[in-house]
Image (cartoon, rainbow, N blue to C red):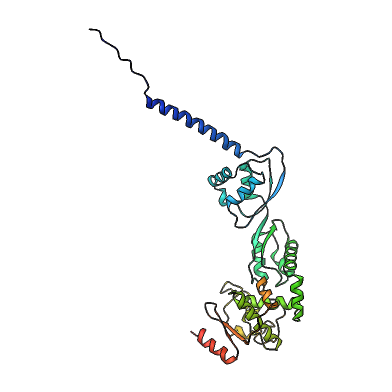
C-alpha cells in the first residue's frame, strides 16, 4: 500500500492577515512619526521675529491656532499635544513674546513659559493707590514707595493693562495717565463742566460713589450720585462712611484697607470725615471705574437725601431723616 504525504502550509491565512496588518501598522506609524517630526520643526529657515500676544484668559487651542496662522509653528494640534504631554500648558501665562519663525516647536513652547516681554495685569474698580502699588510690586521690579510718592490717587484707571516686565515706576504711571486721558473723554469733560464740575470734583465724587454704591447696578449708581451731589450743593454733610475708611487707612486687625467702622472711628478728626466736614473731601479716595464716573456726570435726580445698604448690599432710600432712621432700624438693626 502506497502511503501519501500531506504537505501542510507552514503559515495559515490568519498568520498572513496579521502579518499584513502588522506591516500596515508599522508603515502607518512610520508615516505618523515622520509627519509629527515634520510638524515640530521650524516653519522657516529665516529667523524672522514677530511679537506675539497671548490674551488674558485665552485658551491653548486659541493661541495655538494663531501661532499657526502667524507661521510661527507648523501645526497647532501637534503643538497642543506637545504642550499637554510636557506639562507646559499649565505654565504658559498671558503676555507678549518675541518669537522667531526659525525655532522648533519645543523652543517656542519654552519661550512662552519664560520669555515674556510684557504681562497682563488687571486692576478692579475702587482700589486705593496703595492697593495698586502692592499688586504692581508683586508683578514688576519696582520701588513701591517711589511709585506711591508719584501716583495720583483716583486717576489710576481700573482696567486691564499690558505692561513691559522691565517697566519702571515712571513708565507705569505714564501708562495709567495715557489710559485715563483716553477714557475720560472731551465730551465727558464738557458735560461735567455744564454742571459746574471740574475733573477733580468728578473723580472725587465718583471715587466716593464707587465705594458707597457697592456696584449693584447702573440705576443704583445714578441714584446715589444724585443724592451725593444734591447734599454737596445744598451744603449738607455727605456723611459717606467710605471717606472715613479712607482716612483710617490699613486695618491690621482686618488685614484690609477697607474696614468695618466703629463709633469711635466715625468721630475721627480728619478732613476726610464727611460726617463732620461739609463739602467734598480734599481728593479722591480710590480709583473709580467708568460707570461711577458716568453716573456722577449723568446723575439721576430724585426726592431722596439718604441711603443705606443692608447686609446683603441692597439699597434703601429715604426722603427725610425720620425715614432714614426707620430704614436703619428695619434693615440694619440686629
Query: 94 above or below 104?
Result: below
User: Which residue is drawn at the image coordinates 70% and 61% (left, top)?
Assistant: 142
Q: Nearer the viewer, residue 52 or 150?
A: 52
Can you name the residue that lies furthest to the bottom here?
Answer: 322
Q: Quadrant of residue 205?
A: bottom right
Quadrant of the drawing holding the N terminus: top left
| Residue 332 visible, this orientation | no
Q: Nearer the viewer, residue 116 or 24?
A: 24
Question: Quick check: 332 left or right of 158?
Answer: left
Q: Nearer the viewer, residue 329 or 273?
A: 329
Query: 51 above or below 20?
Result: below
Number of numbered discs: 0
Image coordinates for residue 261, horizontal then vertical, percent: 58, 81
Image coordinates for residue 219, horizontal then vertical, percent: 61, 77
Image coordinates for residue 58, horizontal then vertical, percent: 60, 55
Can you name the residue that lies furthest to the top here?
Answer: 1
User: Which residue is drawn at the image coordinates 75% and 76% (left, top)?
Assistant: 191
User: Which residue is drawn at the image coordinates 37% and 27% (left, top)?
Assistant: 14
User: Which residue is drawn at the image coordinates 60% and 51% (left, top)?
Assistant: 62
Question: Quick check: 138 left or right of 329?
Answer: right
Can you name the residue that lies furthest to the left here?
Answer: 1
Amino acid at each position: 500500500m502506497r502511503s501519501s504525504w500531506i504537505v501542510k502550509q507552514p503559515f495559515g491565512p490568519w498568520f498572513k492577515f496579521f502579518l499584513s496588518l502588522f506591516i500596515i501598522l508599522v508603515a502607518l506609524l512610520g508615516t505618523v512619526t515622520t509627519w509629527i517630526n515634520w510638524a515640530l520643526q521650524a516653519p522657516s529657515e529665516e529667523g524672522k521675529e514677530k511679537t506675539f500676544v497671548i490674551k488674558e484668559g485665552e485658551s491653548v487651542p486659541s493661541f495655538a491656532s494663531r501661532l499657526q496662522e502667524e507661521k510661527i509653528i507648523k501645526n497647532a494640534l501637534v503643538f497642543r499635544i506637545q504642550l499637554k504631554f510636557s506639562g507646559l500648558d499649565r505654565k504658559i501665562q498671558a503676555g507678549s513674546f518675541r518669537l522667531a519663525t526659525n525655532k522648533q516647536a519645543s523652543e517656542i513652547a519654552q519661550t512662552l513659559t519664560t520669555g515674556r516681554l510684557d504681562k497682563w495685569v488687571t486692576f478692579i474698580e475702587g482700589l486705593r493707590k496703595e492697593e495698586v502699588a502692592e499688586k504692581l510690586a508683586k508683578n514688576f521690579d519696582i520701588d513701591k514707595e517711589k511709585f506711591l510718592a508719584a501716583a495720583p490717587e483716583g486717576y489710576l484707571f481700573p482696567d486691564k493693562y499690558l505692561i513691559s516686565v522691565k517697566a519702571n515706576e515712571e513708565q507705569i504711571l505714564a501708562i495709567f495717565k495715557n489710559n485715563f486721558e483716553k477714557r475720560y473723554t472731551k465730551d465727558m469733560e464738557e458735560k461735567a463742566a455744564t454742571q459746574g464740575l471740574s475733573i477733580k470734583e468728578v473723580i472725587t465724587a465718583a471715587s466716593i460713589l464707587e465705594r458707597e454704591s457697592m456696584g449693584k447696578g447702573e440705576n443704583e449708581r445714578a441714584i446715589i450720585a444724585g443724592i451725593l451731589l444734591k447734599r454737596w450743593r445744598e451744603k449738607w454733610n455727605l456723611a459717606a462712611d467710605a471717606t472715613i475708611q479712607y482716612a483710617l487707612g490699613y486695618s491690621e486687625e482686618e488685614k484690609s484697607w477697607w474696614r468695618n467702622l466703629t463709633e469711635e472711628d466715625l468721630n475721627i478728626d480728619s478732613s476726610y470725615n464727611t460726617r463732620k466736614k461739609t463739602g467734598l473731601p480734599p481728593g479722591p479716595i480710590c480709583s473709580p471705574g467708568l460707570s461711577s464716573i458716568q453716573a456722577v456726570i449723568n446723575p439721576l435726580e430724585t426726592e431722596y437725601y439718604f441711603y443705606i445698604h443692608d447686609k446683603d448690599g441692597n439699597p434703601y432710600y429715604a426722603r427725610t431723616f425720620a425715614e432714614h432712621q426707620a430704614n436703619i432700624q428695619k434693615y440694619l438693626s440686629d
